[in-house]
Image: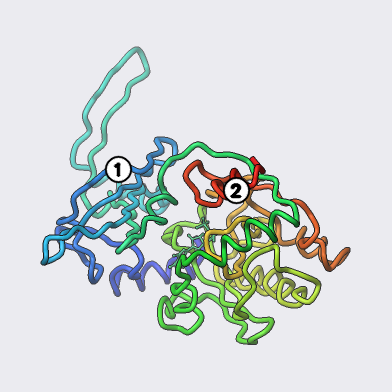
């Protein structure tokens, strides 16, 4: 662990949680979300491998109406420096089975060593619920014409709020979490830990770089005109990460999603050794490849067919089906 991560953890211990996650210590510590009063409507998705469950919850308002919430519970990775404490301070070690030299146990820990990362979207829209619901997926091969006739009108008709992006850019939210900023309005950006990363360990390092410039929706809008911005994000983003976390650019996966969930250009920075959600070949485009492609041809992303997966109930899939493209 780097000094900066240690420092960050000490600061968090002093300050309480960072406002994105809710930590449960008998009462809710994050303002505004009454976790213990939420009723679980359904499990949207769960993963035994990732030790994660996505819940659709409902919180009753004073008028008796239920307000939807998405709550994601995730068992966090081990922190190397806590392991001796964890072995020493365990409250119970219960034998499950034994055979020759092999045995398995259940190890019970005191609450402070047994936290669950809890991410809350509240109030959640139907689109948030859909985003986390497990679905069949279908591959779409979107030509330039398809983008113009199907995807672009669809994006323009949608109202999935990107207020959280503007809050970060305007320092109205997460201002204390900013890792690096290049304030240039055209070619600058903010680098900040992703919602998915609790910053407790570097194994699952995950940051996003959000450009200051508004109106670049996605990869499809990029031309050679954006090369200075993209080069800044690549170079300065990596420099800031090595400086803060000690992880060199050669151990980072730096990429854009197509389709993204939020149509304001941003770049994902994850630890190369971390199999981050959304880094599969049908969604992730390495920033270095994007830069290279734009250097070869400014119109590259306007012309080429882009492949991506859509879940069964995504409205864009319906539009593609209606146009006979699936
Ligand atoms: P995306 O490619 O548009 O969609 O990435 P995805 O969420 O399907 O991957 C948006 C990225 O922004 C994701 O990695 C999110 O975890 C992250 N993110 C989303 N929100 C709402 C926030 C937020 O409020 N704060 C921060 N720091 N990151 C967020």
Of all residues, the one furthest to the top in this rendering is 100
Image disc number at residue 273: 2
Q: CA distance from mark 1 to mark 2?
A: 27 Å
Q: Nearer the viewer, mark 1 or mark 2?
A: 2
The percent position of residue 67, horizontal first and vertical second, equals 23, 60
Figure label count: 2
Q: Secondary structure at mark 1?
A: helix
Determine crowd level at label 2: few under 14, some 14-19, many 20+ residues with C-alpha closer than 10 A.
few
Who's the residue at 45% across and 58% down the image? 196
The percent position of residue 231, horizontal first and vertical second, equals 74, 72
Q: Secondary structure at mark 2?
A: loop
Horizontal placement of 15 versus 261: left or right? left
The percent position of residue 117, horizontal first and vertical second, equals 34, 54
Snapshot quadrant of residue 183:
bottom right
Q: State the residue position of label 1.
A: 87
Who's the residue at 51% across and 44% down the image? 311
Can you say whether 226 is above or below 45 in the image? below
Horizontal placement of 312 versus 20: left or right? right
Q: Choose the circle earlier in sequence order: 1 or 2.
A: 1
The percent position of residue 54, horizontal first and vertical second, equals 35, 47
Snapshot quadrant of residue 190:
bottom right
- Cβ atoms at labels 1 and 2 below 8 Å apart: no
Who's the residue at 60% across and 63% down the image? 153
The residue nearer to you, when weighing 24 against 135, is 135
Q: Tell me: is circle 1 under 8 Å from ligand 1.
A: no
């Amino acid at each position: 662990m780097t000094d900066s991560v240690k420092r960050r953890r000490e600061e968090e211990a002093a300050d309480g949680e960072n406002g994105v996650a809710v930590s449960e210590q008998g009462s809710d510590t994050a303002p505004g979300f009454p976790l213990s009063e939420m009723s679980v409507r359904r499990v949207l998705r769960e993963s035994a491998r990732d030790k994660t469950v996505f819940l659709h919850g409902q919180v009753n308002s004073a008028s008796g109406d239920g307000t939807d919430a998405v709550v994601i519970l995730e068992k966090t990775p081990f922190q190397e420096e806590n392991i001796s404490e964890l072995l020493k301070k365990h409250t119970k070690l219960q034998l499950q089975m034994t055979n020759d030299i092999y045995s398995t146990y259940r190890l019970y820990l005191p609450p402070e060593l047994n936290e669950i990362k809890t991410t809350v979207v509240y109030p959640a829209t139907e689109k948030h619920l859909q985003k986390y619901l497990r679905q069949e997926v279908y591959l779409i091969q979107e030509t330039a014409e398809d983008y113009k006739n199907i995807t672009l009108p669809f994006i323009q008709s949608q109202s999935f709020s990107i207020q959280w992006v503007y809050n970060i850019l305007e320092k109205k939210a997460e201002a204390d979490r900013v890792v690096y900023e290049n304030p240039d309005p055209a070619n600058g950006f903010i680098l900040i830990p992703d919602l998915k990363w609790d910053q407790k360990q570097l194994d699952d390092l995950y940051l996003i770089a959000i450009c200051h410039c508004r109106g670049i929706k996605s990869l499809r809008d990029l031309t050679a005109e954006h090369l200075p911005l993209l080069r800044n994000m690549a170079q300065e983003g990596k420099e800031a990460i090595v400086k803060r976390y000690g992880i060199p650019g050669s151990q980072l996966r730096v990429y854009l999603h197509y389709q993204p969930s939020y149509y304001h250009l941003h770049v994902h920075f994850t630890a190369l050794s971390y199999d981050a959600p959304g880094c599969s070949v049908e969604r992730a485009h390495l920033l270095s490849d994007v830069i290279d492609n734009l250097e070869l041809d400014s119109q590259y992303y306007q012309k080429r067919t882009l492949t991506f997966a859509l879940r069964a109930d995504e409205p864009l899939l319906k539009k593609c089906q209606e146009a006979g493209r699936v």
